[in-house]
Image: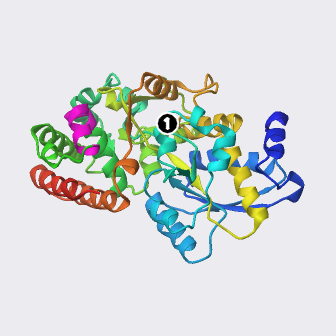
Amino acid sequence: MSTTLKSLLVGTALTTASAASAVELEVTHWWTSGGEAAAVSEFAAAWNATGNTWVDGAIAGSGGTARPIIISRILGGDPMAATQLNHGRQAQELIEAGLLLDLTDVAEAGGWTDIVNPSSLLDACTLDGKIYCVPINIHSAQWIWLSHAAYENAGLEVPSDWNEFVATAGDLNAAGTLPLAMGQQGWQQSIAFGAITLAVAGLDAWKAVNVDKDADAARGPEYTAAFEAVAAARSLASESAVQDWNLATNMVITGQAGAQIMGDWAQGEFAVAGQVEGEDYSCLPGLGLNAVLDTGGDAFYFPVNDDPEITAAQKELAALLISPEAQVSFNLAKGSLPVRGDIDMSAANGCMQKGLEILASGGVLPSADISFSADTQTQIEDLMAQFWTSDMSAADAQADYADLIEKAD
């Protein structure tokens, strides 16, 4: 951490804790893959450099595994000092119960409304005019990752979009390569569904369903084509037996699979493996068909406690997480985009530069965490898990999905 940044944080009028106080803060998160661990260590190192101590509370598994544990601890009176959640509606009930710290004073002092881009990220941290979380990155889910080794082995050119990928699937199979790696978890299958839907159904139909919650659009011909495309993708991934997303990513890294549909956090795994974008792998936002990305991502919330020293340290950490230096170091390691629109990301790799260009052009969409409640998201993930792991027809899956959209809150 630079001397300038440390001076800024230690000297802020919002913070009474100083570096000498060595406050310990337990921070919970679900970043446990190689790339994720490398990224979160950047935050930990920056916090420890202030003289305080980051007590890492990593929870193995996905967010679906970690969130109930995190929420249970807060509700049960055993809160951590800070916790990762996705900005959006996941923490709404905790906020309404008065269990999460109001960060409005930190945000005003830091000028968050001027620096957070897009502004919807900060809006997703806001309830009744008060800010309760610090957005730290932008993650988008509509990416396909392609293995150059797999295509070289099959004597094929690397596809430039989803349609070309589908056309190569037979040749990949003939070369003994799994066309599509897919972890056997509902949230991963839901991500693939969303990415294919955006690419095949198109932006207008996607917005009608995911923003306007139009069940008739979900029953319409554009979504019929999308569900049929997902059913075809299901067959391409039928031999993928791994569970975790990073294991599926490793199949692409090692050339065992031609491709994976996964969010931009997959970049961290390629980086840890020493692979170079454009040489060892390719990345196609919007599956190469629609140059738009959703703006999901991670945020940190701070449970209320009755110790003024801890509260002051929580606010200091909140300010640090969105500081320019921490934003650069964390997001370069994570593969995500920064929430600040005023920092230099020239060191970003080609995939991140593609994302930054889309962000600058305004081609952004709300994420499911913002559009749908946690309950609706869970129901969609459950449906996708059933669809991807059974012989359920595209028509039946579409009908069930439209019913969920009709009842979505």
Where residue 381 appears, as percent x and y from the top left, is 31, 57
* Residue 36 visible from this viewpoint: yes
As drawn, which residue projects farthest toward the front?
129
Image: magenta residue range:
198-211
Percent across and percent down for residue 343 are: 64, 27
Name the quadrant containing residue 386: bottom left
On screen, residue 381 versus residue 97, left or right, reads: left
Residue 336 position within the rendered picture, expressed as x and y whole percent measured from the top left: 53, 38
Name the residue nearer the viewer: 361 or 169. 361
Q: Residue at x 16, y 52 (%)?
A: 402
Classify mark 1: helix, strand or loop. loop
Q: Quadrant of the image for the N terminus?
A: top right
Kindly identify the amino acid type of the residue bearing the numbered disc 1: Ser
Identify the colour scheme used.
Answer: rainbow
Which residue is nearer to you in this view: 374 or 232?
A: 374
Instruction: Tell which of 351 and 363 is nearer to you.
Output: 363
Residue drawn at x 19%, y 46% as measured from the top left: 214
Q: Residue at x 37, y 59 (%)?
A: 374
| Residue 170 in magenta stretch | no
In the picture of the structure, the residue carrying the numbered disc 1 is: 119
